Image (spheres, coloured by chain):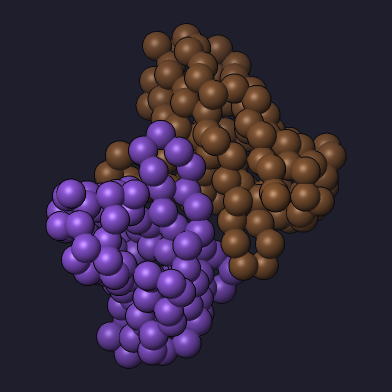
């Protein structure tokens, strides 16, 4: 079974703090994604990566950056957290057909 | 106009009945269509995909695609309480996968 592990299930941070969300997959997939999910807005793509050291902006990249130094690890970085970044963050990896999601990281920014 | 639209619900269906979930999309070039199920507090999981016009059946689930009318639907036969979840429609076109906001389905025992 594909396993996508997100480092933190729940985080509480203060405005202006730097936040790292880590994601590790064990299936040697090329593709990795970061989404955020908000009520009424659904899943929105922040960034994605098709290879090591490669990154592409998704639909809502503002305020975020990513890092992919190793194939199995894809990190989402909030350089200076703001209250409007309070959300559920979902990491995913994919085959050509299917997305496999991690359990999610619920971030609250105070 | 949203790229992928779903009725947010909640949709309440008696146990044993057929649940019908609908999704419309705006990009006529869309090529593949997916239904994900998301239980409360959990992450989405793929339950069905369809590429061609018509019906595709998998157990109690049937996906229906009509490209001319730009809609895709999911039918759940013999609905069970365990089917209570949010169902997300996702549409892929030109390498981009776009999700709808989901329909919350409740099966009433």
State the image coordinates of residue A11 (x, y, percent, origin top left).
51, 16
- Return the x and y of residue A60 as percentages of the image width and height: 48, 44
Q: Give the colour chain A carries in the figure.
A: brown
**Res. B7 in view:** yes
Q: Nearer the viewer, residue A71 or B46?
A: B46
The C terminus of chain A is located in which quarter? Answer: top left
Front-most of A23 and B12? B12
Q: Which residue does the image show at 54% across and 24% down from the upper left?
A: A9
B103 and B3: which is toward the camera? B103
User: Residue B50 location in percent, x, y?
Assistant: 48, 78
Is residue B30 something that shows in the picture? no
Is B103 located above or below residue A80 in the figure?
below
**B16 left or right of A36 in image:** left
Residue A19 vertical placement versus B73 (above, below):
above
Residue B10 falls left or right of residue A98? left
Relative to B10, residue A81 above or below: above
Does residue B94 appear to the left or right of A52 in the view shown? left
Q: Residue at x 47, y 68 (%)?
A: B48
Q: Which chain is purple?
A: B
């Amino acid at each position: 079974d594909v396993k996508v592990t997100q480092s933190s299930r729940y985080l509480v941070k203060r405005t202006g703090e730097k936040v790292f969300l880590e994601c590790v997959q064990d299936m040697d997939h090329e593709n990795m994604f970061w989404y955020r999910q908000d009520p009424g807005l659904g899943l929105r793509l922040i960034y994605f990566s098709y290879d090591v050291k490669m990154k592409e902006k998704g639909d809502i990249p503002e305020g975020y950056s990513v890092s992919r130094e190793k194939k199995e690890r894809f990190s989402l970085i909030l350089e200076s957290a703001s209250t409007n970044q309070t959300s559920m963050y979902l990491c995913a990896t994919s085959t050509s057909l299917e997305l496999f999601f991690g359990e999610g990281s619920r971030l609250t920014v105070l | 106009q949203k790229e992928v639209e779903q009725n947010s619900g909640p949709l309440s269906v008696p146990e044993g009945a057929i649940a019908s979930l609908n999704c419309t999309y705006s990009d006529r070039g869309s090529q593949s269509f997916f239904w994900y199920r998301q239980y409360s507090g959990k992450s989405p999981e793929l339950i069905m995909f369809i590429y061609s016009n018509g019906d595709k059946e998998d157990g109690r689930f049937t996906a229906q695609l009509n490209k001319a009318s730009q809609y895709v639907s999911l039918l759940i036969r013999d609905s069970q309480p365990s089917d209570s979840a949010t169902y997300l429609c996702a549409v892929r076109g030109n390498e981009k996968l776009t999700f709808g906001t989901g329909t919350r389905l409740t099966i009433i025992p």
